[in-house]
Image (cartoon, helix red, strand yellow):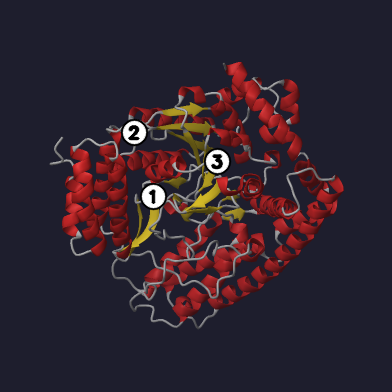
Amino acid sequence: MSSRGVFPVLERFFSQYRDNPSAAGLAGEFRSSLVPAFEEQSPRSFQLARNLYEQALSVVEKDAADKEFEEAVLELQRGLYRELEDLLSSGSERRHHFVIVVPVADRPLMLRNFLGSLIEQCRTFGYGGDGVSQKVTAFVIDDSKDPSNISRIKAISVETTAAGLPVHYVGQAEQSGILKKVPADIRKKLSGLIGGFQGAVPGHKGASVTRNIAYLYLRCRMAAFPENTLLWFIDSDEEFRVKVKSGGEIKDIPFVNYFYWLDRIFASSNLEVLTGKVVGDPPVTPSVMINTFFEDILSFMLSVSAAEPEGPCIFHTERSSVSFSAEYHDMTGLFGYRKADAPKRYHCSLAGWHTVRDCFDDFSGRATGFFSGLHPTRTQFYVHDREFLKTEQARTVYTGNYVIRRSGFRHFIPFAGLGLRMAGPTLGRILRKRLGQRFVSINLPLLHKRTLPEKFTDEFRSGIQKEGESVDLSGEFVRQFWGDIMLFSVEDLTGKGYPGRFEETEIAAAVRKTQERIWELYERHQAEAGGKITEIKKLLEDPGQWWNLRPETQGSVRNLLGFCAVAERNFGPHSAALKKISGQREEGSMTEKIIRAIGSFQEEDRLWEELLKTICKAQE
């Protein structure tokens, strides 16, 4: 068989990078090894092709990152991936099938964006052959409450299927149906994992309970999929893109060939659970990143104060996209990370020539988006690492981006019925203990978007109440506090052998000790927040500042003062959230719930494994 015309994109790569030493070496290998093996129809030709294309892609992708993701380089990258897919599809190698699982709760617009980006990913890189993809299927697990949103989510699922990507809608009826298969005695004992619902399953059960129900539902449907199917759980507010700086602008682009590299990783290892990360908006609640934003606002205000308002914008000076993990988080020390050495400089989002005043106006609008989960000064950008196959042992499951084998159904989301934040990190501590090197993280981030472009609007988020300009974060704040207690109590206990058997007194001592440590930290951060709010308001209200001398900037000043008012109600000395947490600490029932939940894990784990077997036999 002649190789003529089979490798046109690879040939173009050799031509474009002929001065690159690595590419020159690959060209020699191509002529001496791959072409003869292909023409001889040697079985090793597919492995040779894979190795050579991956090395070529490493060169191109580094060049793309170095050149700020120029479109011409991206076009070559995508062409190489599609050409490699054409070659692999003609071989006998078994590639993984992917089941994408997306829980959604009253977020039809987010879901539409998510599924649209999934189709774009399949078409851009060609994993699985012709059409959108022959090896990707999606399940939408609906936890919505609003009937109109339920109808819209069903319609979006149907539309996406018609576009070529099979989408299965799993609503309340389907979820209720799977729970009916659970024996009554087990269902009662596992109410902390799957809810203690009588009759139909309601909406807004919470993400953790919904995922556990999805595990049961999907486990019963795995017979319809190939044995090497991987299940990828992703949140509806994410997309198959990354956030980059390109040509002085901030862009969201498809760059990572997720399916290709996940297939490679799982094919070459015995991994059971893999977790990715996110770029874009931070994946945490505003309640634990307010102080970093205050620091950055003060830095921004001082810079603006010293600038000429009608002069050119001063917030486009390049700052490194490289950041340390969780730099947006107020309490990085809890996770073993250092705190940022200095405030982060704002990177203006406006394009074209504009003034400092224009930037001030734009920033004032973006600041109010913070309460919806934005962090205008600490957006996370994609940082390219040439080795997509590189993994490291993980300690956190990011529940918005993780992949499991079929055996991974064993690892339910623990303590789901408590409805707390930090469920993924808590599960991660347990998996780190149980799985060791079979639980890893990898640099395959998805784009995370807390809000939609239209005036920073966001769809349903548990724990946040909005009424006009008023925002109440106390529900989310409380869930975060007790979630931190749960997480760091489990972390303490896993260091002593958990989830092995523990006496309740040992668990109680760990929880109460952790609670006091976390409470002191929250009180300290509340005091710091109050002081920073005062500083920001003093600057804003200074009559000598240029923004108070111009009628055209009064709207922006009002925006920032409004931000301060909401921040004071939620994080200041009279915060409703801290008062509520203080009352719960004194009352003690939440503490007791966490102690009992941690103590019940071992029995729930045994019953869950039994349930998986029971449901599968009933299905057969």
Q: Earlier in the sequence, mark 3 or mark 2?
A: 2
Q: Disc 1 marks which residue?
A: 241
Asked if residue 612 can be seen in this view, the reply is: yes
Work out whether 233 lies above or below 562: above
Q: Earlier in the sequence, mark 1 or mark 2?
A: 2
Asked if residue 205 can be seen in this view, the reply is: no
In the rendered structure, the answer to whether residue 206 lies left or right of residue 404 reads right
Residue 247 lies in quadrant: bottom left
Q: Residues within 10 Å of mark 2 (few under 14, many from 20)?
A: many
Residue at 23% x, 64% y: name it: 20
Q: Could you tell me residue 96's position as x and y percent?
A: 42, 35
Give the amino acid type for the residue marked by disc 3 in the picture: Glu
Q: Disc 2 marks which residue?
A: 133
Residue 50 lies in quadrant: top left
Q: Could you tell me residue 560's position as x and y percent?
A: 52, 67
Q: Could you tell me residue 478's position as x and y percent?
A: 69, 52
User: Tag count in the figure?
Assistant: 3
Q: Disc 3 marks which residue?
A: 272
Q: Secondary structure at mark 1?
A: loop
Between label 1 and label 2, give the one nearer the viewer.
2
Q: Secondary structure at mark 3?
A: loop
Q: Secondary structure at mark 2?
A: loop
Q: Residue 516: which disc?
A: none
Q: Residues within 10 Å of mark 1 (few under 14, many from 20)?
A: many
Between label 3 and label 2, give the one nearer the viewer.
3
Residue 208 lies in quadrant: top right
Cα distance in 3D space between marks 1 and 2: 18 Å
Q: Could you tell me residue 1's position as x and y percent?
A: 15, 35
Give the amino acid type for the residue marked by disc 1 in the picture: Arg
In the image shown, does 441 or 497 lie closer to the viewer?
497
